Amino acid sequence: MRYEIKGEPLPVVVCKLEEGEQMITERGSMSWMSPNMKMETSGGGSIGKAFGRLISGEAIFQNIYTAKGGPGLIAFASSFPGSIRTIEISPGNDFIVQKTGFLASESGVELSVFFRKKLGSGFFGGEGFIMQRLSGNGLAFIEIDGSAVEYELEAGQQIVVDTGYLAAMSSTCSMDIQSVPGVKNMLFGGEGIFNTIITGPGRVILQTMPVSGVAKAIQPFIVTKSQN
């Protein structure tokens, strides 16, 4: 499979497949394709896996696209202004992704639910305690809200991330929640009460424009029916 990412800040990944190669997606992200790309809807494994995808924010069913009778082309577009990043998944190299961050992947990549080990890191982190784990073998494409900024953390090295800005990380990284020091900082600092602490080793992908942040920013400008 060969691919090209085009069109940021409204990006699309265009994949060129050899005959018999497959791509999977879960949210109707297919934008255009050649006529010989054949779609099949699948439950994607066991009932447990399907339920895990549902509670992690994805659909129960997967769409599998296969190039039939020759090379094929298929494109997957982002659902929000931002970036698309490529992650190479291999045995022992799993990745943890924000829910709804998965866009598409080669058929060898498996999706499952990932629960943050400490409930506090989910309930107070601002994005829920359920994320997605990408495992198996193959290339995966994920959506980033806004621009992507990447760091490679050494063992024990940490980075402090505000709510919603974590897009993805290597499964070798760990995360925890730390309260903002000082009551005055909590109440009047405007940065919330908790921060997410990510500890290496591993790759961390941050995003500059979380959807939740955009919604919060425009909310004061939305006139509701009750105000009319």
Image: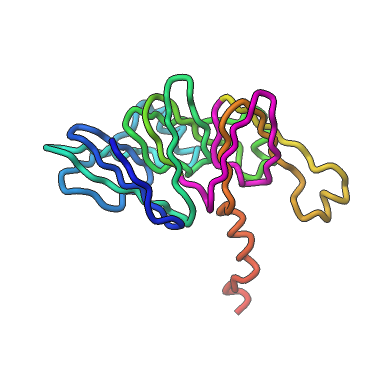
- The furthest residue to the left: 69
Task: Tell me the chief SS of the magenta region.
Answer: strand
Residue 99 placement, left or right of 11: right
Residue shown at 45% from the left, 38% from the top: 54
Q: Position of residue 142 (x, y in %)?
A: 45, 42
Q: Position of residue 105 (x, y in %)?
A: 36, 36
Q: Position of residue 87 (x, y in %)?
A: 44, 35
Q: Position of residue 24 (x, y in %)?
A: 32, 37
- Quarter containing the N terminus: top left
- Quarter containing the C terminus: bottom right
Residue shown at 55% from the left, 27% from the top: 171
In this rendering, is residue 151 above or below 187? above
Q: Residue 123 colored magenta?
A: no
Residue sitting nearer the eye, 206 or 80 = 206
Residue sitting nearer the eye, 26 or 83 = 83
Residue shown at 80% from the left, 43% from the top: 180
Residue shown at 63% from the left, 62% from the top: 217
For the question of whether residue 56 can be seen, the reply is yes
In this rendering, is residue 67 above or below 47? below
- The furthest residue to the top: 92
Residue sitting nearer the eye, 166 or 221 = 166
Q: Quadrant of residue 106?
A: top left
**How many numbered circles does the render carry?**
0
Residue 65 placement, left or right of 95: left
For the question of whether residue 120 can be seen, the reply is no
Q: Residue 152 colored magenta?
A: yes
In this rendering, is residue 42 above or below 145? above
Q: Magenta segment range? A: 143-171
Name the image colouring.
Answer: rainbow
